[in-house]
Amino acid sequence: MATQAGQDVLIKIESIDNAGEFETIAGVRAKSIQLNAGLVDATHTGSSGGWRELLAGAGVKSVRVSGSGVFRDEASDARMRDVFMARQAVNWKLIVPDFSEFTGPFIVSQLSYGGDYDGEATFSITLESAGEITMAEV
C-alpha cells in the first residue's frame, strides 16, 4: 500500500432514504479504524514447557471506529445524532484507500460535542460493530 492522505480515509453512514447508498460524515478531521480479535486461551497442564496455547479460529472479532471533527453538513450531523439517540444499529462504510472497505452494522457508542470560546464547535464519535462486517479490497 502506497502512502495515503489521511483525508482520504472516509466514514460513511447509510442514507436514511436510500438503502444501500452511503453519505460521508462531513467535517471529520481525525479517524481511526481498529480491528480486534479476541483470543481463546487453551493452555492446560500438559502444554509444552508451560507455554500458553491459543485456540486458532476462535474468539470474537470486532471493529471499533472513532472520529472527530467540525460541523459541516447539517444532514449528516442530524443523522449521527438521530442514530445515537435511537440506539440503532445501522450500516456504515469505512474506506481506507488502496487497502480495504469495511461495511456492516455499527452502533454509535459515544457521541460528544465541544468547543473553545475562540474556536469552532467540534464533535467526536465512536462506533462499535454490531454484526458481521464485510471486507472488500479497493
Image (cartoon, rainbow, N blue to C red):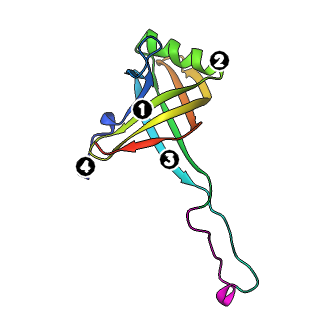
Q: Which residue is mark 4?
A: 3
- Between disc 1 and disc 3, the foreground one is 1
Mark nearer the N terminus (4 vs 2) = 4
Question: Looking at the rendering, which quadrant does residue 56 occupy?
Answer: bottom right
Mark number for residue 136? none
Residue under pointer 2: 85
Instruction: Give x and y (percent) for residue 75.
Output: 45, 10
Does the magenta segment cover residue 12? Answer: no
Q: Nearer the viewer, mark 4 or mark 2?
A: 2
Task: Name the amino acid, label 2.
Answer: Met
Residue assigned mark 1: 93
In this rendering, the label closer to the viewer, 1 or 2: 1
Q: Would you identify the image quadrant in which residue 22 lies? A: top left
Query: At 52% across and 12% down in the image, what residue appears?
Result: 78
Q: Label 2 neighbourhood size at 10 Å, few (<14), some (14-19), many (20+)?
A: few
Residue 55 on the magenta segment? yes
Q: Amino acid at mark 1?
A: Lys
Span colored in magenta: 47-57
Estimate the x, y position of residue 81 in percent, counting from the top left: 57, 16
* 36 lies left or right of 30: right
Disc nearer the start of the sequence (3/4): 4
Q: Determine which residue is flagged by label 3.
A: 34
Residue drawn at point x = 58 percent, y = 19 percent: 83
